[in-house]
Image: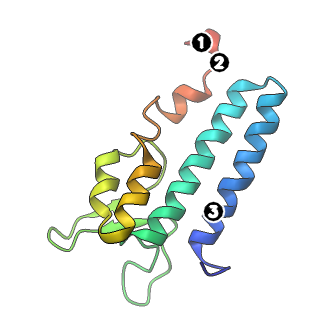
Amino acid sequence: MQVNSEQHHFAHAAARHYKDAVFLMDAARLPNADHHFGVAVECALKSLLLRFTAVTMDPEKPGGKRSNRPYFKDPKTGKTRYYSHLPWVATDIALLTHGRTASPLTTALGGEPGRRGSVTARLRHPADQ
């Protein structure tokens, strides 16, 4: 993995958010810990997608700027699928994997990441739910 690549940055961001989440969890600040665990998962998945699939952050148009979020352009339909915030559909990610890299990535995904709800729901105070 190249040091200045997006996959490298996402991997390190995942580790930082995970450490923050553990710190917050140990301090019994569970809603904030939950948020950081979710961001850690999202960053780790983006790093894996960039490393093991056809997902890219290359410019969408020749001579354009690099994308600010990972995306996949379906060669058959021409449609672009952006990977911003969770939840993503696990089957959507599984379809992107192929060959020897498919099994470890789909195993790492385990189920449907982020299926516990939206970012907005996770940020609400428990008394408001």
Task: Tell me if mark 1 has few (under 14), some (14-19) or many (20+) residues whose alpha carbon lies within 10 angstroms of its own.
Answer: few
According to the picture, the residue beneath numbered tag 3 turns out to be 11
According to the picture, the residue beneath numbered tag 1 turns out to be 128
Residues at circles 1 and 2 in contact by the CB criterion of under 8 Å: yes
In-image side of 129 versus 35 (left or right): left
Q: Where on the picture, by quarter, is residue 21?
A: top right
In-image side of 46 versus 103 (left or right): right
Q: Where on the picture, by quarter, is residue 34?
A: top right
Task: Tell me if mark 2 has few (under 14), some (14-19) or many (20+) residues whose alpha carbon lies within 10 angstroms of its own.
Answer: few
In-image side of 81 versus 109 (left or right): left
> Outermost residue, bottom direction?
63
First in residue order: circle 1 vs circle 3: 3
Q: What residue appears at the point 77 percent right and 46 percent down from the top-left corner?
A: 19
Task: Tell me if mark 3 has few (under 14), some (14-19) or many (20+) residues whose alpha carbon lies within 10 angstroms of its own.
Answer: many
Spatial separation of the CA atoms under disc 1 and disc 2: 5 Å
Residue 127 rendering spot, x and y as whole percentages: 63, 9
In-image side of 18 versus 100 (left or right): right
**Helix, strand or loop status at disc 3:** helix
Residue nearest the observer in this picture, 122 or 7: 7
Task: Please count the marks in the image.
Answer: 3
First in residue order: circle 3 vs circle 2: 3
Give the amino acid at mark 3: Ala
Eye-nearest disc, 1 or 3: 3
According to the picture, the residue beneath numbered tag 2 turns out to be 125
Q: Quadrant of the C terminus?
A: top right
Residues at circles 1 and 3 in contact by the CB criterion of under 8 Å: no
**Helix, strand or loop status at disc 2:** loop
Q: Quadrant of the N terminus?
A: bottom right
Q: What residue appears at the point 82 percent right and 29 percent down from the top-left corner?
A: 26
